[in-house]
Amino acid sequence: MCYPTIQSPMDYNQMSYSDQRRERLNVAIFDYISDEETGMEELFDDIIAEVRDSHEYFARYEKKCANLLDKLNAVRDASADDWEDFWNSTEEEISSDDC
């Protein structure tokens, strides 16, 4: 593909998700290529910036998930007495801010 292939919205509805995703990529690249004021360096830089942004975004969530797993693993290793204290304690509440 070197130019957008969708002719009507109906065509888009008949495509698999993978084909739709590829078509969106095709449209974005074609937009850069067909813009007389945009060079290939800008396309290259924008792709790198998007990949970096995605990496940073998912890294934040990876860290949050790792922290949550650490807390859950600590709870899993609790003794029967620890569980008894946990269920009967009114002193400390755990909130989502702890994660």
Image (cartoon, grey):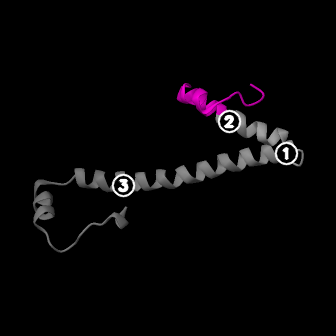
Image check: 23 left or right of 78?
right
Residue wearing tag 2: 25
Q: Are marks 1 and 3 in contact (CB under 8 Å)?
A: no
Asked whether 44 or 36 is in front, the reply is 36
Q: Amino acid at mark 3?
A: Leu
Q: Which class describes the residues within 10 Å of circle 3: few (<14), some (14-19), or many (20+)? A: some
Q: Position of residue 70 (x, y in %)?
A: 35, 54
Q: What mark, if any, has residue 41 been given in the picture?
A: 1
4 magenta-colored = yes
Determine the secondary structure under disc 2.
helix
Residues at marks 3 and 2, CA–CA distance in whole angstroms: 35 Å
Which residue is found at the position 58% from the left and 29% from the top? 10
Determine the secondary structure under disc 1.
helix
Mark 2 against mark 1, which lies toward the viewer? 2
Residues at marks 1 and 3, CA–CA distance in whole angstroms: 41 Å
In the picture shown, does residue 87 fall above or below 17? below
Q: Amino acid at mark 1?
A: Glu
Image check: 71 left or right of 89?
right
Q: Magenta segment, which residues?
A: 1-23
Q: What mark, if any, has residue 68 been given in the picture?
A: 3
Q: Which class describes the residues within 10 Å of circle 2: few (<14), some (14-19), or many (20+)? A: few
Determine the secondary structure under disc 3.
helix
